[in-house]
Amino acid sequence: MDIAKLKKGEAEAFEQFVKEYEKKVYNMALRLLSDYDLACDASQEVFIKVYRNIANFKEECALSTWVYRITFNVCTDMRRKSSRERTLSIDEESREGADLISMIPDTDPTPEEAVCQKESGQLVRKAIDALPEKYREVIVLRELQNLPYNEISSLLNCSEGTVKSRINRGRQKLYELLSGCGNFFCNISSNR
Amino acid sequence: MNPCEEIRDSLYGVVFGEADEQQTRIVLEHLDGCPQCRELFVKLRALYNGLQEIPQEEPPEELSRNVMESIRKIRAEKRRNRRIIAACAAAAAVAVIVFLPGSRDFLTGSDSLLSGGTSQTASAECAPSSPEAPMPAADQGAPMMKAARNFNTNDDAATGGGSPEEVTGENGNQMQQFIAMSGTPPEEGEDAGVFYIKIPSGMTSQELYGILSVKTDENITEIEVDAQQAQQIRQICQDNGFETSGQVYTDSPYITVKTAG
C-alpha cells in the first residue's frame, strides 16, 4: 500500500486501500458489534475517518494497526450509542455458567448453513459473539487481529497486566462455552 | 497446588505460543505422563486451531461504493472550504489596506490601486460574490485583489463553489464555529466542529472526563457537546496542559469532542 499516495489524497490510491482493507475492517467490526448493519455503518465511518486523517498518520506503527485503532474506537462508540444492543448482552454477570451459544439467535437456518455451523471456526465465532463485552474485545484484538499486548493496552487505555489477565480469562471462557456446546470437542476428538 | 493445577495454569500460554522455552519444556514433560492434562492440551489446541479457522465474511457490496461516494462529497466540500478561506484572507487584506492610516491617500492618489467602492469591498468579508459587494476594477498590480476576484469567479461547476448561498450557508457557519473554537481555520483533513484531546499517559479516560466535568460512560471515546461546553473543555485542557488537536492522535489514546449544531 502506497501511504504517500494516500496522504496526497489520491482517489485511486484510496480506492485501492478500501479494497484491501474492507474485509478486515468489516470482520473486525462484525465481531466487536455482532450486528451486520452496525458493522457496515461502522466500516464506512472508519474509512471516512482514515481519509480525513491519513495526512496526520505519523507511521510510528503499521498502517493496519492504525486502522484497527480507528475501527476499535468507532465500534466502541457505536456500541454505546446504539439502542439496538442485542438482548444477549444485557447483563454479563447473569450469563455466568449459562449455555450462551444456544442463546444466540440463528440468522442462518438453511440446511447448508447448518452443516457449516458444525465447522469448528463457525462454532468458535459464535462462542466469541457470546463472550461478555470486555472479554470479546480483547479476544478479537488479540486472536483475530493479532495485535500485540502493548497495542491492545494502548487501545483499551489499561495496563498490559490487565490485558493479559482479560485475555487469559477470555480464553478460559471460550473453552467453557465450547465445552458446554458439546459438538465442538466431539468433532475435534474424532477429526484430529 | 498439585502439579496438574500448576501445569494447567501454563497450558494456555504453551498452546497459544506465549510461554517461554523452559515453561514449555516442563509442560510437555508433564503431558507425557498425565492423560488428563494431555486431553485438556488437545482440546485447547483445538480451540486455538478453531480461532485460526474463523471464516471471514464478505462485506456487503455497497460498502466500498458508499465509502467512495462519501469521499467524493468530502473532496468537493474541501475545495469549497479552501475557496472560502482564500476569500476571507483576501477580504481581510483589503480591509487592512483600506483602513491603515495614510492608505486612503495612497489608494485614491494619482498612483491609486482602487477607484471607488473600497469600503464595500472590505465589508464584503466572506461573501465576496454578493451583488452588494462589487469587486474593484481589474488591476495588474494588486495580487490580493486578484485572489479575491479569482474566488469570485465560479470556476468549479462540479461543486458550484462560490455562490452566495454556499458561502453563507452551512459550510460557512460550520467554519466560523470552528474558527471561533480553535482560533484557526480547519486545515486539510480536519473536521469543522470537532477536536481531539490526547489522554495523558497514566490517566484513564474516566479520570480525564472527571477533570473536564463531563459525565459520561467510562468506555465511550466520543462526546457531543454544545459550543459553550466545547469552549469550557478547551479552557480546562489549556489550564491543565492537556494536549488538544484538530486531528486524531495516531500515537496515543484520545477522546473526540464533537460540537453539536
Image: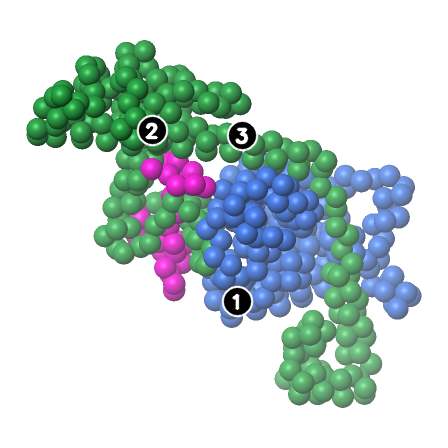
Chain colours: A blue, B green
**Quarter where residue B98 is shown:** top left
User: Which chain does tag 3 point to?
Assistant: B
**Range shown magenta:** B185-213
Question: Quadrant location of the C terminus of chain B?
Answer: top left
Q: Is residue A96 above or below residue B247?
A: below
Q: Amino acid at mark 1?
A: Asn
Q: Which element type, helix, strand or loop, lies under badge 2?
A: helix
Residue found 19% across the figure and 16% down from its top: B115
Identify the residue under disc 2. Answer: B147
Identify the residue under disc 1. Answer: A150
Nearest the camera: B147 or A99? B147
Residue B73 is marked as 3
Q: Amino acid at mark 3?
A: Lys
Q: Are marks 1 and 2 on the same chain?
A: no
Measuring from the top left, give residue A146's x and y in whole percent. Answer: 64, 62
Measuring from the top left, give residue B52's x and y in whole percent. Answer: 75, 61
Residue found 60% across the figure and 31% down from its top: B69
Residue B210 in the magenta stretch? The answer is yes
- Is residue A98 shown left or right of residue B214? right
**Sequence order check: which comes first, mark 3 or mark 2?**
3
Nearest the camera: B57 or B108? B108
Local crowd at mark 1 within 10 Å, few (<14), some, or many (≥20)? some
